[in-house]
Image (cartoon, rainbow, N blue to C red):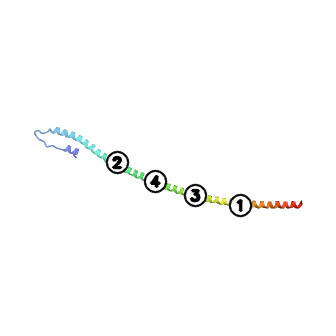
Amino acid sequence: MITPLDIENKKFSKQMMNGYSVEEVDDFLDELTIDYTKSYKDSTDLRKKIEELEKEIEHYKNIESTLQNTLIMAQKTADDIKNVAKQQADQIINEAQGIAKEQANNLENEIILKKKELDDIKKQFDIYKAKMESLLISQLELLKDINKSDA
């Protein structure tokens, strides 16, 4: 690329006949140097700015990538925690159901035993009642016999 200094230092050979006016060429080259210097400086500045922006873009891409990885890890961790919690909840439910079944079986067995005890007590009561009834009848008979003998 031609630099502004190249334009400024450019020399043309002078011809005597039908040549360009040296003063006009020099003036034009001066104007061209000023414009080209400005354009060259702007171009250089823009290239630097592009480099800076590309570095920033790369920086933000790295941040984005890091954030995406972090989000993925957070989601995976959340899923893992959720799965562990579900497993623990299922285990607690299963244990509670097992305990409830065991307690229900124990209560049923206790009810059966209490019913058997009740039946045994009823039988004992019936036997006692029959013995008392028999005793009372025999006492009544004895009283009747005593009353007959006194009469």
Foreground label between 4 and 3: 3
| Residue wearing tag 3 | 101
Q: Secondary structure at mark 4?
A: helix
Q: Secondary structure at mark 3?
A: helix
Q: Secondary structure at mark 2?
A: helix
Foreground label between 4 and 1: 1
Foreground label between 1 and 2: 1
Foreground pick, 121 / 149? 149
Q: Residue furthest right?
A: 151
Asked whether, in this view, residue 122 is left or right of residue 107, the answer is: right
Upstream in the sequence, badge 4 or badge 1?
4
Upstream in the sequence, badge 4 or badge 3?
4
Q: Residue at x 54, y 57 (%)?
A: 94
* Badge 3 amino acid: Lys
Foreground pick, 142 / 58? 142
Foreground pick, 135 / 120? 135
In the picture, the disc for residue 123 is: 1
Disc 4/disc 3 C-alpha distance (Å): 32 Å
Q: Secondary structure at mark 1?
A: helix
Q: From what the image shows, is residue 104 above or below residue 51?
A: below
Asked whether, in this view, residue 46 is left or right of residue 125, the answer is: left
In the picture, the disc for residue 57 is: 2
What x and y, as percent, mark residue 91? 52, 57
| Residue wearing tag 4 | 79
Badges 4 and 1: C-beta atoms under 8 Å apart? no
Asked whether, in this view, residue 65 is left or right of residue 83, the answer is: left
* Badge 1 amino acid: Lys
